[in-house]
């Protein structure tokens, strides 16, 4: 994948986001970190207090369970919405012309639901991988190897 000079590259998952800028050229990117944000999100077992509830259902002639809320996943989805909102604000301030987003499939799907029109118009590529824990040089290699 070609990474245009001065392109914004966002690497995110449900707990961490990296905003990188390509100070290199399209063929040989040189990504520089502009912003890092990480949030605490303990496992669901540490956030929930009780198991799912049950109720008696006369229609099914027995008990019915309620779906247990996954607070950890809810928090990761909320963080993706926050990332999309930051992208919108930066796009509306014309802080980037080209955008590449790298995120795991679930996070990428959540981001897509919340892309603003200005963000979508500047989007030049997406990669469905989790690279938030990787060094910048590995992110550059992954981008240049992508089709």
Image (cartoon, rainbow, N blue to C red):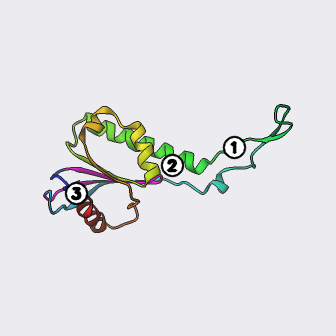
Question: Which type of secondary structure does the marked residue at label 3 adopt?
Answer: loop
Residue 91, horizontal then vertical, whole percent:
27, 37
Task: Choose mark 3 or mark 2, whichever is in front.
Answer: 3
Task: Check whether the beta carbons of the residues at disc 3 and disc 2 lie within 8 A of each other.
Answer: no
The tag on residue 82 is none
Quadrant for the N terminus in the image:
bottom left
Q: Residues within 10 Å of mark 1 (few under 14, many from 20)?
A: few
Q: Earlier in the sequence, mark 3 or mark 2?
A: 3
- Magenta part of the chain: 7-25
- Give the side of residue 69 with respect to residue 7, left or right: right
Q: Earlier in the sequence, mark 1 or mark 2?
A: 1
Question: Which type of secondary structure does the marked residue at label 1 adopt?
Answer: loop
Q: Whole-Å distance between the Cαs marked 1 and 2?
A: 18 Å
Reading the image, the residue beneath label 3 is 1
- Which image quadrant for residue 138? bottom left
Q: Whole-Å distance between the Cαs marked 3 and 2?
A: 28 Å
Q: Earlier in the sequence, mark 1 or mark 3?
A: 3
Residue 70, horizontal then vertical, whole percent:
62, 48
Reading the image, the residue beneath label 1 is 67
* Residue 132: in magenta span: no
Question: Which type of secondary structure does the marked residue at label 2 adopt?
Answer: helix
Residue at x 43%, y 55% (from the top left corner): 104
Task: Choose mark 1 or mark 2, whichever is in front.
Answer: 1
* Residue 10: in magenta span: yes
The tag on residue 76 is 2
Magenta stretch, main secondary structure, is: strand
Quadrant for the C terminus in the image:
bottom left
Residue 115, horizontal then vertical, whole percent:
36, 37
Residue at x 32%, y 36% (from the top left corner): 89
């Amino acid at each position: 994948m070609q990474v245009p000079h001065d392109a914004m590259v966002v690497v995110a998952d449900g707990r961490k986001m990296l905003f990188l800028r390509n100070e290199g050229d399209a063929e040989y990117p040189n990504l520089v970190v502009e912003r890092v944000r990480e949030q605490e999100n303990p496992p669901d077992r540490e956030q929930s207090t009780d198991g799912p509830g049950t109720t008696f259902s006369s229609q099914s002639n027995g008990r019915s369970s309620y779906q247990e809320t996954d607070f950890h996943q809810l928090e990761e989805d909320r963080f993706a919405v926050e990332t999309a909102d930051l992208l919108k604000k930066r796009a509306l301030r014309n802080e980037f012309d080209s955008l590449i987003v790298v995120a795991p499939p679930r996070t990428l799907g959540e981001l897509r639901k919340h892309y603003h029109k200005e963000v979508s118009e500047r989007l030049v590529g997406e990669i469905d991988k989790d690279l938030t824990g990787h060094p910048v040089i590995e992110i550059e290699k992954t981008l240049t190897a992508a089709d």
